[in-house]
Amino acid sequence: MELVCQSKLRLDGLKTADLEKYEGLDIKDICSTGLDSAGLNHCAHFVSHALNLGFGMLCGNMSWDTKGQGVCIRVDEIFNRCKLVGTWSDRPLCLKPCLAFVTPSTNIQGNHVGSSPKKHIGIFIDDKIWHYSNGSDKVVTDSPERFLVKFKGLYGSKRNFTLVCWAMNKLLVVWACTLLATFSNLALANQEALTLLLGNGQLVISMQPACEPYQPDSQRSSVAKTLSQDVAWALADMVGKPVEIESLCEVLPDARKQCRVVFSVNQGELEWARVYQFTSFPNSLKTPKLADLNCFNLP
């Protein structure tokens, strides 16, 4: 199962150069809390130091003198903060950098990873996964294919393994898949509809009868499974082109809102748009729910 996550954490500014300083380093050269035993699994420990993930069980909590210091040391605590999941093969090609996880498929239940110790994490950027090799006690890089092969060999080749990814982005779909696009109206006057759309990214497309799933140019045999993935794939096909966003909500008499988000490209003879229309209704949740989702392309 692949992970695409909406979080307060961000990866969109990460560059390969930010990770190169770690290559070949032992964890003792990275962590100052003293949690550097070669007998421990430091994969999440390294990733958390590289990205400054200061939540959950911290490395400093392993000693009274450094209690409350350091970064997260548990793969499951990073994974389980993620809200949107899918398979690596379904990952929008533009979604990088992101986090990469490998674990037996049976160890993933919904959006959560289980207690099996057979799980590993790395950072995917520029076609490489940066991760901590516990056998060599240093930071190394591998291609996603090599990463998966390594852990099939380590955990047992007869198991069904899954490679998953996580993009830590506040506005996941927009920023992850349009870093190379040029928005002519990025400072939207009304961002409510866009916020509602992205905040309900876990909606299952197959459960929305009026939503025609987007099929990306690069993955025509695949169909988006979630709303977040649908939007990401549409934006991926707009990368490198001037993109306009229309975001509008109108209040209905019964306090519901009729909303529309349109991502459009108009470049010479190339003119098309991806449209999302829906009704939003207030509730006690932080993010209002959507109903009557209608998705289609124009023309």
Image (tube, rainbow, N blue to C red):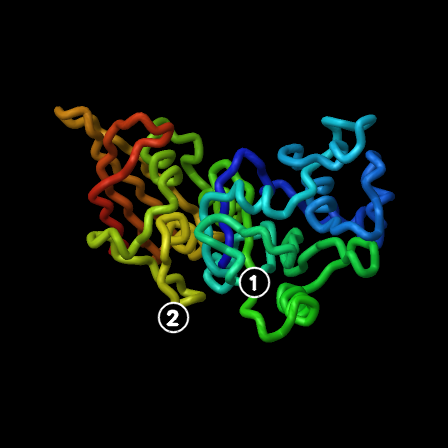
Above or below 61: residue 298: below
Residue at image x 78%, y 56%? 134
| Residue 104 disc label | 1
Q: Residue at x 56, y 62 (%)?
A: 104
Q: Residues within 10 Å of mark 2 (few under 14, many from 20)?
A: few
How far apart in space, not on screen, are marks 2 and 1 (Cα)? 25 Å
Quadrant of image for the C terminus = bottom left
Q: Nearer the viewer, residue 163 or 75?
A: 75
Q: Position of residue 34 (x, y in %)?
A: 85, 37
User: Residue beneath label 2, please?
Assistant: 221
> Which residue is drawn at the image coordinates 70% and 67% (left, top)?
154
Residue depicted at 28% across the width and 47% down the height = 275
Residue 33 at least partly seen: yes
Q: Specify the amino acid type for callout 2.
A: Ser
- Residue 266 visible here: no
Specify the farthest residue to the bottom: 158
Q: Is residue 210 above or below residue 160?
A: above
Please state the total of marks drawn on the protein image: 2
Left or right placement of residue 153 versus residue 204 in this view: right
Looking at marks 2 and 1 on the same chain, the residue that comes earlier in the sequence is marked by 1
Q: Quick check: 81 left or right of 298?
A: right
